Amino acid sequence: MSTGQVGRETFDEVMVPNYNPQAIVPVRGEGSRLWDQEGREYIDFAGGIAVNALGHCHPALVEALETQGRKLWHLSNVYTNEPALKLAQQLTQKTFAERVFFANSGAEANEAAFKLARKYGHDHHGEGKFEIISFEQSFHGRTLFTVTVGGQLKYRQGFEPVPGGVTHVPYNDIGALKKAISERTCAVVMEPIQGEGGVIPADPLFAQQVRQLCDDHQALLIYDEIQTGAGRTGHLYEYMAMGVTPDILTSAKGLGCGFPIGAMLTRADIAESFGFGAHGSTFGGNPLGCAVAGRALELISDPQLLVGVGERHDQLVEGLRQINSRQRIFREIRGKGLLIGAELVESWHGQAGQFLAAAREQGVLLLMAGPNVLRFTPSLIMPQGDISEGLAKLETAIGRIKASE
Ligand SMILES: *Cc1c(COP(=O)(O)O)cnc(C)c1O
């Protein structure tokens, strides 16, 4: 049942080749299942890279989008709008934050966070306080500033000169941070669990020591919760489970459950540095995105849903362990909630892409986090029957790869 008009091959004809999409084109989704142009069905462990937190086409979100779609689409920031105000109210009630800035993506939320940290440093400590410290292997987006702050050289190479005043130190190494931090540091930026970098959780003691070092040096602590936030780890935001409160937090991905939206959250005293005219965005705070995210946040912050994330974590990890007891393919299974990484044994390092393709052929969609790690970021409400079915298909795919060696 091909639509006959466009297909995967069209991509190479009309799109910039910065992606290399899988051989199928999904056309419809419902819950944790997807269907491609040929009508083939897939179980979705990828969730749009930790975006579709309530699965595909959740009826309550479709409802929110349709209702808002008949009322008001866009206003510009010359006016404010009800969905944005209500979403900001929810976010400030549910988190440490007192002020919210809306953007359209994760990178834009981080761009706002980094600019705010610089501006706050300037305002309170003078021109010399501009340095941003982040961690090796971290990922913060693909704009020029965010690839510069991100700790992966490959995203930066060829785009130089990049903005200055950014330093990288190893993650989970407090000694290295202690050496690097100084009175020049305006902010330290971290992901509570490095997502793209390989699903690597921060050591709890390390996280507390980072907070302390920031306080000692009057540097702001920025948590990039773009991947870990919006219920992904089984907490509304992962900082809540860590006993550490950041000064600025960024959220995107699961926040809109598939409708593009990003948010930067902070305290009122810090927000003062973004006075009138200091920063802006044409679409940030768009009524459609805010209406969807508002409804999504109501559903995701339900304690019972968050408990369900932990249950699904256990089921998925146990299933992966069982597969491993038979296949001996994973070196380590790690992560929290429904952000799970399965690192391949060393002899299969570099081959994660091959597993994605083989899994897709068996009707299950996964992600990778670098070339050595299979990543699972499914819907937070994935039916438990879909999890077991997806795991069975994954094991078939693994068996095929091993047999074809
Ligand atoms: C995905 C991601 C980003 C970038 O978000 P975009 O919406 O792609 O700009 C930034 N930080 C983290 C931790 C992410 O996972």
Image (cartoon, helix red, strand yellow):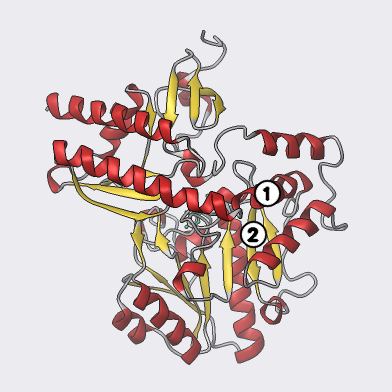
**Which amino acid type is shown beneath numbered disc 1?**
Ala
Judge left or right: residue 315 versus residue 44: left
Which image quadrant is residue 398 in? top left
Q: Distance between the residues labelled 2 and 1?
A: 10 Å
Q: 10 Å neighbourhood of mark 2: few (<14), some, or many (≥20)?
A: many
- Compared with 327, 283 (above or below) is below
Q: Disc 2, disc 1: CB below 8 Å? A: yes
How many numbered marks are there?
A: 2
- Which numbered marker is on residue 293? 1
The quarter in which the C terminus is drawn is: top left
Q: Is residue 161 visible?
A: no
**Residue for point 60% across, 84% down:** 121
**Which amino acid type is shown beneath numbered disc 2?**
Ala
* Residue wearing tag 2: 263
Q: Where is residue 38 in the image (x, y as percent from the top left)?
A: 47, 12
Q: Position of residue 187 (x, y in %)?
A: 51, 78
**Residue for point 55% across, 51% down:** 304
Q: Which of marks 2 and 1 is in front?
A: 1
Going from N to C along the chain, the mark reached first, 2 or 1, is: 2
Q: Can residue 222 be seen in this view?
A: yes
Q: 10 Å neighbourhood of mark 1: few (<14), some, or many (≥20)?
A: many
- Compared with 254, 168 (above or below) is below
- Compared with 168, 128 (above or below) is below
171 and 59: which one is in front? 59
Q: Could you say whether the residue bearing mark 1 is in a helix, strand or loop? A: helix
Q: Where is residue 68 in the image (x, y as percent from the top left)?
A: 81, 40
**Residue for point 40% across, 55% down:** 195
Q: Where is residue 380 in the image (x, y as percent from the top left)?
A: 50, 45
